[in-house]
Image: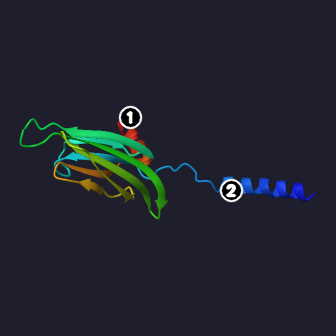
Amino acid sequence: MKRYAFIGSLALAVVILSGCAKKDLTPRFAGRIVSHVDTYGSGTGGQSELKPDGSMRSGFKYGDPAKPDWTSDIKWRLIRQRGEADLYRVEWTFTLRNTAGNTKAAEVPFDGRKSVLVFSNQWQVVSIEPGMTKEDSQQAARHVR
């Protein structure tokens, strides 16, 4: 009898703990990761939609021997929601031509309302920029019709 009680208790514990398991997180805010060449808002660079997990490669060939060409790899992952923000872990590997890459990482809160500077050096600025919400895109689609 004790054996069945133990097995029943163990099964109940498994069910309870599986309900406490971490669920897949979904971003609460639309946004994009942006690579700005040289300075923030330069109008050159690349961007990618801010998904729960993602990566992008960026770079620039100046065509000027005084400025070295470079590449960067940016990876991000939504790690949790904290208060009114989604918290992302962002990793940035910046490589100047013919040198070893330099990697940095940061945890960055994004609330969907304001831009967040993540990393920068003299050649690149990486930021998270607010994007259109689902409601914004639905309203825009209605105006196009």
Q: Secondary structure at mark 2?
A: helix
Decide: is 85 above or below 100: below
Looking at the image, residue 70 sits to the left or right of residue 89; the answer is left
Q: Residue at x 41, y 54 (%)?
A: 88
Decide: is 34 above or below 63: below
Decide: is 136 above or below 13: above
Check disc 2 and give the amino acid type: Leu
Q: Looking at the rendering, which quadrant does residue 84 occupy? A: bottom left
Q: Residue at x 36, y 40 (%)?
A: 143
The residue wearing badge 1 is 145
Residue 53 coordinates in the image, percent (x, y):
44, 45
Check disc 1 and give the amino acid type: Arg
Residue 66 coordinates in the image, percent (x, y):
6, 43
- Please tell me how crowded label 1 is: few (under 14), some (14-19), or many (20+) other residues with Cα within 10 Å: few
Quadrant containing the N terminus in the rendered view: bottom right
Of residue 71 and residue 141, the one placed in the foreground of this image is 71
Q: Which mark is drawn over residue 17?
A: 2
Residue 49 coordinates in the image, percent (x, y):
37, 42
Q: Which mark is drawn over residue 115?
A: none
Q: Secondary structure at mark 1?
A: loop
Front position among marks 2 and 1:
2
Q: Residue at x 37, y 42 (%)?
A: 55
Quadrant containing the C terminus in the rendered view: top left
Residue 108 in sight: yes
- Please tell me how crowded label 2 is: few (under 14), some (14-19), or many (20+) other residues with Cα within 10 Å: few
Q: Earlier in the sequence, mark 2 or mark 1?
A: 2
